[in-house]
Image: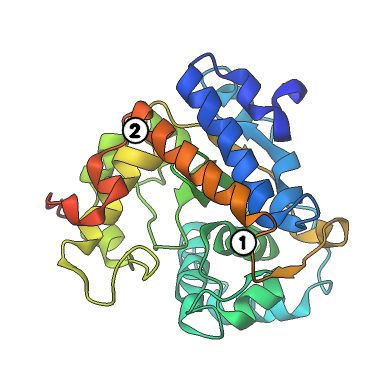
Amino acid sequence: MFEKYLGRNQSEIYADDVTKTGCRLWLERVLAFYGEDGGVDVEIIDGQLPLTEKTADYIYSAFTPIEPAYRPGSRPMLEKIVAGAVSAGMSEREKALALMRVVRDSRTHGLASPNLFTGGSEEELLKRGAVMGNEVSRVLVVLCQIAGLPARTHSSHISGHMMAEIFTGGKWGWMDPMKGVAPVLPDGSPASAWDLFRSPILFERQPSAVWDDIRPTRIQFSDDGLGPDAKSLVMARNRDCYFHPREAASIGNYFAGDFLNYTYPWRMDAADPVRLEEIRHEEHVNRRKMGLPDYYFNQYLFDEVLQPV
């Protein structure tokens, strides 16, 4: 179902010219950076389907298997990490949050802090301290599946970020493992990506427990951050950018047991740096047309203070 919109054909589902153009430019940017032989970060695109009014019912019913086909013993390092983070007495949500924190904090370790490398298997990403959203999100997805929790990726192509959804307590819940954001609905249940698309104002209505998990990244902030408002910027960026009504979003299937179907090269330089810079310019022009806020382009223009409820 919806096969004609999968993978590299995602832009075809959009009628809005700005959204369609933004989705097309995202794919060109990925290929300019990683190259056609860019490995998993290109190959993973094949499992992505746009999240729209047309596809939402399917995505939240039959699109992702609720029984992950993972064979215990096939990824022992990751199993050890899961065993160290979760325990039998935890609820499914508690397990997902514990694994999200492991992934969120992995950037503190290894060689990734100066952002020298991209690529690698999930095991290698944890060793080197992954920091990019597409990398940490697939790490969280794989760890959750090993823990017995169905999980998948969520991408906001135009504003440029990959995140995740985890199935706990009979419901999909959205998480951003790069920054440690795991919002809930007013009743305390996990908020899905679709919940947040339909009501991004939910990011203004999160309890202290959600705010406590937020850890802004140095990719997005200087070493001294933005003082006490750094977490506010994280929440506002979700509300105004990643869940913008004209965003080209996708949900993607990526499974821990399928690692032999992917390749995991490392990369230090863009495959086509000249084209990459051209695309980045085109993307910024299109993002202006899309209506992203001024602070998206310069974080120091952000002056809003959000607080826990």
Q: Secondary structure at mark 1?
A: helix
Q: Which residue is mark 1?
A: 144
Q: Is residue 116 left or right of residue 281?
A: right
Residue closest to the far right? 260
Quadrant position of residue 154: top right
Residue situated in front as seen by the camera: 226 or 275:
275
* Relative image position of residue 219 (x, y in whole percent): 40, 66
Query: In this picture, is 195 found above or below 269?
Result: above
The answer to whether residue 168 shows anywhere in this view is no
Q: Which residue is mark 2?
A: 288
Query: Residue at the spot x=38%, y=27% of the render?
Result: 245
Query: In this orientation, which residue lies closer to the viewer: 193 or 20?
Result: 20
Q: Position of residue 303 (x, y in %)?
A: 12, 51
At label 2, which amino acid type do we have?
Arg
Res 31 visible? yes
Front residue of this view, candidates 93 and 125: 125
The x and y percentages for residue 17 are: 49, 18
Q: Residue at x 28, y 39 (%)?
A: 202
Does residue 27 appear to the left or right of 115 in the view shown?
Answer: right
Name the side, left or right, on which 169 lies relative to 238: right
* Up/down of 256 relative to 47, above or below: below
Q: Residues within 10 Å of mark 1 (few under 14, many from 20)?
A: many
Q: Dividing the picture into quarters, in which one does residue 293 lie?
A: top left
The structure residue drawn at horizontal position 74% and vertical position 57%, both measured from the top left corner, is: 40
Looking at the picture, tell me which residue is in the foreground, 10 or 306. Answer: 10
Instruction: Please identify the quarter of the rendering in which residue 119 is found.
Output: bottom right
Nearer the observer, disc 1 or disc 2?
A: 2
